[in-house]
Amino acid sequence: MRSGSGEILTRLRDQGAMSRAELSRLTGISSAGVTKITAQMIRDGLIWEHDASGSTSVGRPPVTVELRSAARSVLGIHLGAGQVHVALSDIALNLQHTRSMTYDLSEPVGGLIARVSDLAHSVLRHCDLPRGRILGVGVGVPGSVDPARRVNAHSVLTGWRGIAFAEAFEQSLGLPVVLEHNATAMAMAEACYGAGRAAESILYLLLGKGIGAGFVQTDGIERRSAVEIGHIVVEPGGRRCRCGGRGCLERFFSEEPLRELIGNPDLPRSALVAAAMDSPEWPKLYEYLLQALSTTVTLLAPERIVLGGDFNDAPERFLQELRSDLPPRVMPQQRIRLRVERTSLAEPVGVHGAACVALEQFLYSNGPSSTAARNFVRQVARA
């Protein structure tokens, strides 16, 4: 549940400038409460007010308030499988000072954390912002996270288990940190800032070294979760998967098996789906994808499916076929509103997702003085 300030900030983010009367009506907060909260936000520099009429007519002009996008910033860190992106984001998810690096999946986690921290410090030095203007850090990780969003519980792709990334980055960066599953973070960014702003729920389907998904529901009670679509069994008794099972979708539909199918180890990842579609094996692979995706849609009932990673570079005919072939495989009531789209966010999408998670945690859920941030400050003071 959002605080009063968080609710007001979220409305201004989603719907733009509006009057205090409109904010009171939409949030259910009393007029006096809205006036008090917005006055404090103006003093803090988070919002500003202006004459909405654009005229010099006699009488009191209508006044609206709106976000000051540069008022605060967060740091986004996307830990992909083999690649890292770090960037600074303002409160409207505009990225600046993006830095990137690669790593080997066999690299010790401690060394990886140190190198990523150095990259993050480089971004912070370059932005030259007072630390008080930076609310915190969002980190997108492969695999599931614990309920407190502090620990990368398990990543089949990297082999990580129980990695306390939040604590490690807090110690190295001196800022509060929150974690989220990569694809789920990207789904959040699409829901708040991209293709899914008008949708009640989103399934973000991500193709890369593996294939995974994240689900976000924004209508009513907010819900988000990692979706292990890559480990739905599509061929019982089939190829051994790194998860320990057999016949998982990921063993047929991810970077490694697609490269084996095509026989070209140097082909850019952006061309993998197009090349696979020209293979005699494509009908079987496509059927496996449809099988896993239709099962996921039937269970979660997303209103929007957003294609990311290497799916975003797939030929237009792939998108058209998916739009045609998927609806008949799900429930009739789901077909009516189901839409399939490419991601609308610019690369690196993963760092957009990580920054969105930080903004949601440290600004929009609880306002600029979130519980997590206050607790972190107290911990630093006691240390």
Image (cartoon, rainbow, N blue to C red):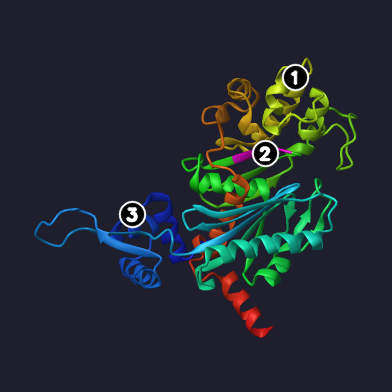
Q: Nearer the viewer, residue 378 or 366?
A: 378
Q: Which residues are magenta?
A: 203-208
Circle 3 crowding by C-alpha within 10 Å: few under 14, some 14–19, many from 20: many
Residue 219 shows in this picture:
no
Give the left or right position of residue 269, taking residue 323 as reference. Answer: right
Identify the mark at residue 17; answer none if there is no mark.
Answer: 3
- Could you say whether the residue bearing mark 1 is in a helix, strand or loop? helix
- How far apart marks 1 and 2 lie (CA) works out to 19 Å
Residue denoted by label 1: 282
Circle 2 crowding by C-alpha within 10 Å: few under 14, some 14–19, many from 20: many
Q: Amino acid at mark 2?
A: Leu
| Quarter location, residue 87 | bottom right
Give the left or right position of residue 234, taking residue 311 as reference. Answer: right
List x then y, in percent, for residue 221. 55, 52
In this rendering, the answer to whether 129 lies above or below 193 is: below
Q: Earlier in the sequence, mark 3 or mark 1?
A: 3
Q: Earlier in the sequence, mark 1 or mark 2?
A: 2
In this rendering, the answer to whether 369 lies above or below 189 is: below
The quarter in which the C terminus is drawn is bottom right
Residue that appears at 78% across and 56% down? 153
Identify the mark at residue 206; answer none if there is no mark.
Answer: 2
- How far apart marks 3 and 1 lie (CA) works out to 49 Å
- Could you say whether the residue bearing mark 3 is in a helix, strand or loop? loop
Q: Earlier in the sequence, mark 2 or mark 3?
A: 3
